[in-house]
Amino acid sequence: MSCIIIGASHAGVQAAVNLRGQGYEGGITLISAEKVLPYQRPPLSKAFLQDTLPEQRLWLRPEAFYQQKHIDLKLNTRVTAINREQQTVVLENGDTLPYSQLILATGASVRRLNLPGSERKGIHYLRDHSDTSGIKAQLPDVTNVVVIGGGYIGLEAAASLNKMGKNVTVLVNTARPLQHLTSPVISDYLCRLHERNGVTIETNILATEITGGAHLDGVTCDNGKHYPADMVVAGIGVEPCTELAAMCGLAISNGVEVNGYMQTSDEHIYAIGDCANFHHAIYNKPLRIESVQNATDQAKTVAQAICNKASAYTALPWFWSDQYDAKLQIAGLSTGYDEVVVRQESDTSLAAFYFAKERLIAVDTINQPKSFMVARKHLPTLPNIDKTLLADPDVAVSDIFTGAEACLT
Ligand code: FAD
C-alpha cells in the first residue's frame, strides 16, 4: 500500500500529516516541484515580504518531521504524467513510482500579463517563495511600484511595499478593489486605509503596455496616463493546476471534479485544495476555493476517506487578509447576497453581515474578531438573525446569535 501526493503545500503536507494521524501504515511520497521545504504561502505577501518573518518560520514543518513520520519528501521534483491503468506517476527524470492511492494537491498558478512589454525585467508575480525572494532582491533599487490588480494579493502587496517605503500605485480594472469579493462598504474602508497610508488607487483602468528598455520604466493605461515604475507586481488571479488530471482523462471543470470525499472520477485518485472543484454542502453549489482553511480541511477529509473512515466535506469556508493595522476576517461566502447589515463598533472596527433571502450567508469583519468568531460558529446553519440588533454595537454579538433560528439543520 502506498500513497503518492503531488504538491507539497498547505493541502499536500496536511494530507500526509493526517494520513499518518489516521494510522496509515503504507509508504507516503510527497512530491514538490519547488526547491525549498514546504512553506506557508500567506506570509509571502505580508510578513515575509516585509522581512519581519524569518525564513525558518515560514516552513510548514521542520525537515526532520518528514523523516520522523516516514514521509518521503521529494523536493525539486515535477510529476509529468499519471498512468491510471498501471497506477504509476512519471517524474521529469523519467522515473516511475507506483501508487495505491494518488492525491492531487497541485494548487493553482498565477495568470500572467499578456500585453506589450510583459517580458520586461522588473515584472513580478506573487505565488511562490521564489517570487517573493525575487521581489525582495530587487527592492533596494526600487522607488516606484505599480501593482496591477485590486484583489487581496494586490492590496496586500501594496500595503507591504508601502510599509517598506515605496511609492505605490494600484491599478484596478473595476469600479472598486475587491469588487467581486466583497461589498462596497469593505472596499471603501480599505481604499481609504490605503490612501491614508499614501497608496494611490486608480479604478476603472486597464494597463495597456509596460514601457521601458530591457528593464521597465512604467505602465501606460487605457486612459492615456503613464505611471512611472521601477517594479510592477501583478496580482491578476490564478488558474487551477489541472494539466496532469486532464492528460489522464479525469473530469475537469474549473478544477479537478471531486465528490464529497475528494475523490475524482477515478476511485484511486483524489484532489484537494486550490485545484479541486467540489459540491459545497452548505451553499449547495459547485465551488473551487482558494484558502488555507479549505486546503487544510480537505486534507483531513481525504485522509479519512483513504483510511476507511470517510466523512463528507462540510466545512464552512473562512479566510483572512492583513493590510496595515486592518485584520480582515471572512467567514462564509457572500456571493449572491441581497442585503448587507453593517455593524460599526469604532472608526477602525466594522463588520458586514451578508444575507440572502433573510438567511445569514457570510460575514466580513475588520478588526472585529468577536463578530467573526461568533458568526463563523453559527453560519453553517445559515441562521435567521435579527438585523436591527446586529447593527447595534451596544448589543453583544454573542447574545444576538444565542437562540437564533437555524435555517439549515
Ligand atoms: P498551492 O499552495 O498552490 O501548492 C501547490 C503545490 O503543488 C505547489 O508547490 C506546486 O509547485 C506543486 N505542484 C503543482 N504541480 C506539480 C507537479 N506536476 N509536480 C510537483 N509539484 C507540483 N489564503 C488564506 O486563507 N489567507 C491568506 O491570507 C492568504 N494569503 C495568500 C497570500 C499569497 C501571496 C498567496 C499566493 C496565497 C494566499 N492564500 C491565502 C491562498 C493560500 O495560500 C492557498 O489557498 C493555498 O496555498 C492552497 O494550497 P494548495 O496546497 O491547494 O496549493
Image (tube, helix red, strand yellow):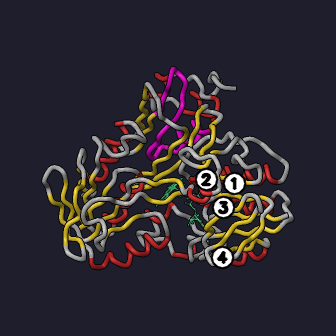
- N-terminal of the pair, mark 4 or mark 2, is 4
Q: Which residue is mark 1?
A: 299
Give the image quarter of residue 7.
bottom right
Residue 324: tell me if it is visible.
Answer: no
Rounded to the nearest whole Å, what is the CA distance between mark 4 and mark 1? 28 Å
Q: Which residue is mark 3?
A: 12
Which of the marked residues, 3 or 4, is nearer the chain's N terminus?
3
How far separated are the C-alphas under marks 2 and 3?
Answer: 8 Å
Say which of marks 4 and 2 sits in front.
4
User: What label does residue 111 carry, if any?
Assistant: none
Lower sequence index among marks 3 and 1: 3
Residue in the picture at 70% in, 41% down: 260
Q: Is residue 260 left or right of residue 210?
A: right
CA–CA distance in space, label 4 to label 2: 27 Å
Q: Which residue is mark 2?
A: 273
Q: Is mark 3 within 8 Å of ligand 1?
A: yes
* Among numbered discs 4 and 1, the one appearing first in the sequence: 4
Residue type at the position of mark 1: Ala
The disc at residue 94 is: 4
Q: Point out the stretch of residues depicted in magenta.
A: 353-376
Label 4 element class: loop
Residues at circles 2 and 3 in contact by the CB criterion of under 8 Å: yes
Label 2 CB less than 8 angstroms from ligand 1:
yes
